[in-house]
Image: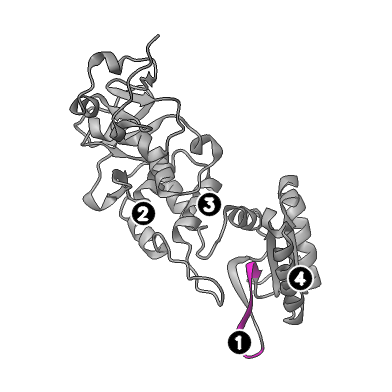
């Protein structure tokens, strides 16, 4: 059996449209060869991949130039945090404006969105819903906590005494203004409720989930992200994942990177400095979180009690 002839360099290793193939001089026989798959009509895929998400999306928007990548597919292109069920989904979400037919193709989930120009952007040369719009559209696909995790990532910003400053993808005030202006959109109430629990300064999804575990217990004081522990002169000495200034109690979530010798040495210094500054530190591990909110809250309560807190002395 003869091996298929090599593809032109511009088509090697990426999905492509029949129009692109024909412009390179490929005939119908070559496009029916066994080394090409057909994920959807008028699209060919060489080999089995894997392909970057943008490469998978590109042929679809070339065939539907009035469409835009949206929902969880847009979130993935923006690099936003998603639960595994959406991060690994095989379908691509494409949207067209009202009055146009909903995209109906194999491996495509079609939607209609009435988008203003500022609600669209470009990622890797592909039209995609802008970040705030993507967060709004994903609200119907995410749980409350998952939506807050994504919101925390979008608005996260900080400037610490170490490392580069972090700039918000969308400042919280702008995200609030955008959601306030979308009163008639689907899932707007869910977004507004989530925004009440979004906080600036979070570095990772586990920190958000830990904070929500505590926040769901109305008896506990609020812990804020990225709190600076300062010396007597007011200079930051330690930055903690979550902190309650009223009771000088801080929390550190210890992920896998805390197991390296270098990180452990930094952690030992941080632990001593935290104690010197008069704060009670509670370390929360992945195992604690896996055991559930009850385990985490009990551990935090012990730290708060050491710092002088009791349920009867809650702040107003």
- Residue position for label 1: 234
Residue 82 versus residue 227 in the image, above or below: above
**Is residue 187 shown to the viewer in this render?**
no
N-terminal label among 3 and 1: 3
Q: Please provide percent x and percent y for residue 276.
A: 76, 81
Do labels 3 and 4 touch, CB within 8 Å?
no
- Residue position for label 3: 149
N-terminal label among 2 and 4: 2
Left or right of residue 109, residue 165 in this image? right
Residue displayed at 50% across by 39% down: 87
Separation of residues labelled 3 and 2 (CA atoms): 17 Å
Separation of residues labelled 3 and 1 (CA atoms): 31 Å
Label for residue 179? 2
Give the foreground label among 3 and 2.
3
Q: Please provide percent x and percent y for residue 4.
A: 35, 17
Residue 265 versus residue 101 in the image, above or below: below
Do labels 1 and 4 touch, CB within 8 Å?
no
- Secondary structure under badge 1? loop
Of the pair 123 and 55, the residue shown nearer to us: 55
Where is the C terminus found, in terms of image quarters? bottom right
N-terminal label among 3 and 4: 3
Q: Please provide percent x and percent y for residue 243.
A: 65, 69
Q: Badge 4: how crowded within 10 Å, few (<14), some, or many (20+)?
A: few
- Please state the extent of the stretch shown in magenta in the rendering: 232-243
Give the foreground label among 2 and 1.
1
Separation of residues labelled 2 and 1 (CA atoms): 37 Å
Q: Badge 2: how crowded within 10 Å, few (<14), some, or many (20+)?
A: some
- Residue position for label 4: 268
Residue displayed at 64% across by 55% down: 210
Residue displayed at 24% across by 24% down: 18
Q: Badge 1: how crowded within 10 Å, few (<14), some, or many (20+)?
A: few
């Amino acid at each position: 059996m003869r091996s298929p002839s090599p593809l032109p360099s511009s088509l090697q290793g990426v999905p492509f449209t029949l129009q692109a193939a024909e412009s390179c001089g490929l005939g119908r026989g070559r496009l029916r060869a066994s080394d090409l798959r057909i994920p959807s009509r008028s699209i060919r895929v060489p080999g089995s991949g894997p392909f970057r998400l943008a490469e998978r999306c590109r042929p679809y928007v070339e065939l539907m130039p009035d469409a835009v990548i949206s929902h969880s597919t847009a979130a993935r292109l923006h690099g936003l945090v998603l639960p595994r069920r959406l991060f690994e989904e095989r379908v691509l979400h494409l949207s067209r404006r009202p009055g146009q037919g909903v995209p109906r193709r194999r491996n495509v989930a079609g939607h209609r969105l009435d988008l203003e120009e500022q609600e669209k952007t470009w990622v890797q040369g592909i039209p995609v819903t802008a970040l705030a719009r993507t967060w709004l559209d994903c609200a119907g696909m995410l749980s409350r906590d998952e939506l807050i995790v994504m919101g925390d990532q979008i608005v996260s910003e900080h400037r610490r005494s170490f490392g580069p400053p972090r700039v918000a993808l969308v400042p919280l005030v702008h995200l609030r203004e955008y959601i306030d202006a979308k009163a008639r959109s689907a899932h707007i109430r869910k977004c507004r409720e989530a925004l009440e629990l979004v906080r600036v300064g979070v570095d990772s999804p586990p920190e958000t989930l830990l904070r929500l575990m505590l926040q769901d217990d109305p008896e506990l004081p609020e812990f804020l992200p990225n709190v600076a522990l300062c010396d007597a002169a007011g200079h930051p000495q330690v930055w903690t994942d979550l902190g309650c200034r009223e009771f000088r109690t801080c929390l550190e979530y210890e992920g896998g990177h805390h197991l390296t010798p270098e990180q452990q040495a930094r952690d030992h210094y941080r632990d001593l400095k935290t104690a010197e500054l008069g704060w009670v530190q509670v370390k929360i591990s992945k195992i604690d979180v896996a055991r559930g909110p009850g385990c985490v809250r009990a551990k935090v309560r012990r730290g708060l009690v050491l710092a002088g807190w009791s349920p009867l002395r809650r702040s107003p």
